[in-house]
Image: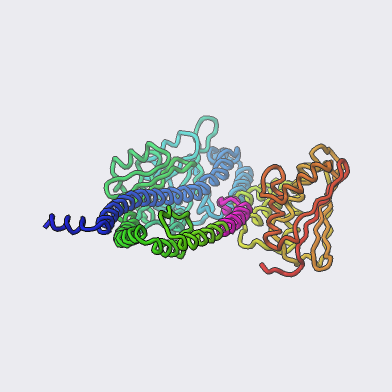
Amino acid sequence: MIRQIFQYVNYSFKRKMIVVFSTVFALLLIFTFWILYLVVSQEFTDRIINDMQMILDTARDNIDYYFNDMKAPLVTIGRSPTVADLVSMKEEETVFSERLSKERELTDLMNNFNSFKTYMGDLIVLGENGYMKNLISGLNTDFVLSSKEWAIECHDFSERGIHYFMPHEVDYYKRNPYPSAVSAIFPIYRGHVAEGYIMCDISAQRIDAILDNFDFADGTKVYLMDQNGQKIYLHGESTMDNTLSAYMTETISCGAKGSFQGGDELITYTTLQSNGWKIISISPYSQILSSVRPMLQICMIAVMVSLILSVIVSVALVRYIEKPLDQLVSRIGQVESNDFRPAFEKGQQYHEVAVIRNRFEQMVSSMNELINKNYLLELRRKEMEYDNLSNQINPHFLYNVLQLIQTEAILAENEQIEEIVVSLSYLMRYALDNRDKLVRLRQEYEYTKYFLELYHKRYEKMFIYRINIQEELMEKTVLKFILQPLVENCIKHGFRDKKAGGLIEITAQEIEDVVHITVYDNGCGMSHGKLQDIRTHMEQPAVGSSVGLANTNQRIKLQYGEGYGLMIHSEEGKFTRITCTFPSEDWGK
């Protein structure tokens, strides 16, 4: 049987070439697809792990925000001499009017913090002398902190600093405001003796809500573990959980963040910077592999299809060797499938076929050059658009920080800081809003005004600015961030040697359906040679010191056409004037 097969294969050169080529090609395909599957599946798995780590890091930052924000009321109230007096003075030694005054001061202090930090469940002040004060009514009068199991097991309250406690049952109210809470406690010292404590509660449901905002894989459990690895809280449950193995707990306690495989589960964890707690996610590995299995099926199908194609290619190769005309047909088929690579060696051909083949290859080469040229133009356009995207940071966190700074400035009655924060907030919101590349000129005007105002506050004596734009032009559509590079050029280059007396003037007018926006400065100007260099660089890809102007010029030309862009005029030691032109018709947003 085997002998007959060999005889059949060796009967002709054509059969032997087909069998040999098909076999070798099939083995190469199987090997290639298997390696590709291993590499891609590993990369896919790593990406899932990285995404899970990123989710935990984001959750950590959100939870850390609350815990760090709790420090201000705890430390401020805990270190107040008034509070220290209230928790240490004896009732028989107390002057009623003095005590009443101190209690009013404490009440005002607690209410002030409560009005700004709405996430707080309650603030409770407890004294060793029996003093008790809180924000929510209904606190049990016999509440003793040291009697609570969740508190006494975790910390020695004689230690200074803030102590954090895992979610625990709230059973010290006549009517519980929330089922469970996360608590932070700060001892109140008078001298070297802890006379009392201030406790801040946050509803555990608020922590759960943060974790609920993230899209964890099906079957994933999320835990909170304290810094000692003793208390473990399962997200979504009201009780503690002790299902983590000793190996998991020990491994997690040894690092700040990371991931590892524990049996059939993937464990990912990170550490809260505020108190050292761990956020842990445990996902079934089967859930991760279920996302990779379709790739194996695709690879197997691709191998089968490729095996069939290998036979077809083998026949085509033999026919190519035998018939030059078939070679041309095969080449045409390659071009039809968008394969513009240079053709393999032609071999012996008839003159007529060679002429057709040469003309065809010239046509393919021209098409390839045209496609590459268009591809580079599109790539250049995409790169320029990418340069205008803002960094993807967490805007919610930055807005909260700026709001906090603004609040502190208002409390401190510092109007200058408040104005700076308001300007910076507007700049950030405008920059991070990447929904539209075309905006109204009014929006660009507002952004540029805030931008100049911030620079003016920093270099108050260096320059003044004036903006004169006709009201009827304010609703014209314009490319976003078209003015900032121009005014920034004035400050960085025009006023680099100027200490005072600088002027930036922005004007706009419409001439024959074309909007002209001019940015003028009375700075150092530039020589004729330098001006020519910049004009040349502006017509080339954005590189070098004039990258901002070149980028802006190219964006205008790509959007509106070659008839528009930037024009620069300057005299050394006198002025620089940059005029931006674009059509006045409404291009939409």
Q: Position of residue 565 (x, y in %)?
A: 75, 57
Q: Quadrant of the C terminus?
A: bottom right
Q: Residue furthest front?
A: 351
Q: Specify the principal SS of the magenta part.
A: helix
In the image: residue 307, left or right of residue 140 = left
The colour scheme applied to this rendered structure is rainbow
In the image: residue 50, left or right of residue 308 = right
From where the camera sits, is residue 456 visible? no
Asked if residue 382 lies in the magenta stretch, the reply is yes
Q: Nearer the viewer, residue 180 or 60?
A: 60
The part of the image, by quadrant, that contains residue 385 is: bottom right
| Badge count | 0
Residue plotted at (70% across, 48% down): 548
Q: Nearer the viewer, residue 265 or 492?
A: 492
Q: Quadrant of the N terminus?
A: bottom left
Q: Which residues are magenta?
A: 370-399
In the image: residue 347, left or right of residue 192 = left
From this view, report whether residue 504 is shown above or below residue 371.
above
